[in-house]
Amino acid sequence: MSEYRPPSAARVVVGVSGSLGSLTALGQATEEARRRGAELWPVLAWEPPGGDLTARRSPAAAVMIPEWERLARERLFGALREVFGGTDTGLPGQALVARGAPGRALVQIADREDDLLVVGAGRRGRLHRALSPSVGRYCLARATCPVLAVPPSPLQAALAAVHRRNVWRLRLDTGDMRREFETVPPDA
């Protein structure tokens, strides 16, 4: 990231996990930060496998925590490289790795009224919603600042469809693909 400014400047805090949806949210957050003249704070929240309670009970987990944090930092920097070509966003602010549940960590970091919290709002099926709580919904319900929920890129659905066809070893009709990609707006 670029230079650090005192925390009195307006901030755009964005949840980053490395997923396509979070990369789309990071791009949108960057545009918002530039437009507002605000700092950009990409945040990757992580929890130990099995959660904090399990990690506290296991002496072996205590040894692994620095390694898990290092891996989280690498994932955050990988996402920044994916979007910006490097770890410098060209904007003031700082990249953070926060230990904790993603929704809770993002809401705690974006705690000022003049902050903007940006999260990905991916399409999720009923089963996925039941098994894994939505970070976006958590943030929308509990944040004290404005929240921008960024829908996934239209290309994400097309890529998921191609992936499903590959998994099931179904024939891929490139004519259908071409038509699908031609309907996507050029700025997506």
Image (spheres, rainbow, N blue to C red):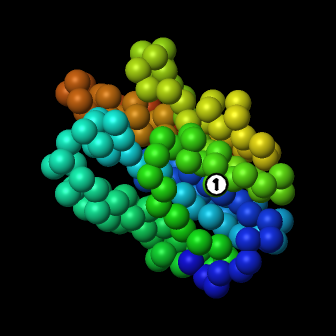
The x and y percentages for residue 138 are 62, 32
Q: Which residue lies furthest to the bottom in this view?
A: 3
User: Which residue does the image show at 28% across and 36% down from the upper left?
Assistant: 54
User: Which residue does the image show at 41% across and 49% down from the upper left?
Assistant: 46
The N terminus is located in which quarter?
bottom right
Q: Nearer the viewer, residue 56 or 118?
A: 56
Crowding at dot 1, Cα within 10 Å, few <14 / some 14-19 / many 20+, comes out as some
| Horizontal side, residue 85 vs residue 153: left or right | left
User: Which residue does the image show at 71% across and 80% down from the upper left?
Assistant: 5
180 lies above or below 81: above
To which quarter of the image does residue 48 belong? top left
Q: Nearer the viewer, residue 56 or 35?
A: 56
The number of callouts visible is 1
Q: Name the residue under label 1.
A: 109
| Residue 174 can be seen in this image | no
Q: Amino acid under label 1?
A: Ile
The x and y percentages for residue 102 are 51, 43
The x and y percentages for residue 148 are 73, 44
Considering the numbered disc 1 on the image, is that residue within a helix, a strand or a loop?
helix
| Residue 133 can be seen in this image | yes
The x and y percentages for residue 62 are 24, 53
Q: Nearer the viewer, residue 76 or 24?
A: 76
13 lies above or below 57: below
| Horizontal side, residue 44 vs residue 25: left or right | left
169 lies above or below 126: below
Q: Which residue lies furthest to the left in this view?
A: 60
To which quarter of the image does residue 78 belong? bottom left
User: Which residue does the image show at 16% across and 49% down from the upper left?
Assistant: 60
